[in-house]
Image: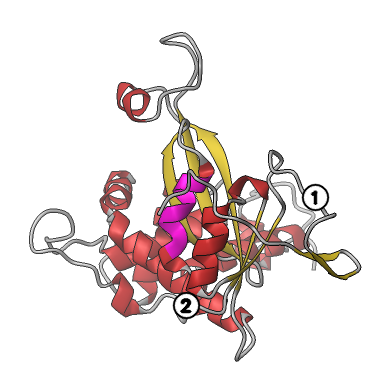
Amino acid sequence: MTKNDPFFPGFHRVLFGRRPVSEFEKMTRKHGEIEKLCLAQITALFGAFVPLSLLDFKSDAGSNSRRRVFTPIVTFWGFLGQVLEPGNSCRKALSNIQTLFATNDLELPASETKAYCNARKRLPVRLLTRIIDYVAGRLCAGATPIGQGRILVVDGTTVSMPDTALNQAKYPQHEQKKGCGFPIMKFVGLFCLNSGAWIATAKSHFNVHESRLFTRLLRHLRKGDTLITDRGFCSYWAAATLTAMGVDFVMRNHQRRKADFRRGKRLGTNDHCIIWLRPKQCPS
């Protein structure tokens, strides 16, 4: 039944029903419903990797000591969802949290994002660190065959930092005029090759060599592991220390150390055994 009367145009919506919804509008509404469930889905997907016992972080005084709407658990899951979705704003993260509260018949947080942003700042670094350690351990254990050691990779890099007086004092820039350039941090990371998990990090200012930072990561190695490094970490001390720990290693010879294959014993194709004498200058 169609309407041909040009008068009273508003009545036909009451008499003949609503206008048909386009397929595009249906898809848009469906996408909105899926986004509202994003936070609950993240909890369902990653809850097994991050148990609630780790997120139940409270202190007797200071941050997270008061009873708040944005507890560390709520803030962490909202923050994780914001990080996983590129371009996600704090307002959208807050909207997802409000949806989660409404689904569970809880009082909705305020619509202003200030409380959520402050809650993110209150997330303790110790909480995030122990979550990273737990997740990395689970990933390495799941990717390593039973009865075999882990295959680990160590490498270093640098990053520039905001140009503040505090950063300049702790991480000075490299060989530039005073007041020019940005603070530079050097750090060395330890990775699991099978799973890609970032296990540990050691950081310092630019003038510290990567091999010195590597010494801080030795406590994360276990007997039976295999470590892969580049030539920057190759030294007699590193080889002797890893051998004493029961850690196998694969690394290229340092560019300043000459290899004379006329000495030693040939074991096969591309396989040569030599005796490496302890240098005079070597850490004990």
Residue lying farthest left? Answer: 61
Describe the colour scheme in one phrase.
Answer: secondary structure
Q: Taking 129 as reference, is 142 left or right?
A: right
Question: Residue 246 versus residue 185: which sits nearer the camera?
Answer: 246
Q: Amino acid under label 2? A: Phe
Region rendered in magenta = 211-218
Question: Residue 68 versus residue 53: which sits nearer the camera?
Answer: 53
- Residue 16 drawn above or below residue 48: above
Classified by dominant secondary structure, the portion drawn in magenta counts as helix
- Residue 129 drawn above or below residue 7: below
- Residue 8 drawn above or below residue 20: above
User: Which residue is tagged 2?
Assistant: 49
Q: Amino acid under label 1? A: Asp
Q: Is residue 92 visible?
A: no
Q: Position of residue 200 (x, y in %)?
A: 46, 59
Marks 1 and 2, the one that precedes in the sequence: 2
Q: Is residue 103 magenta?
A: no
Image quadrant containing the C terminus: bottom left
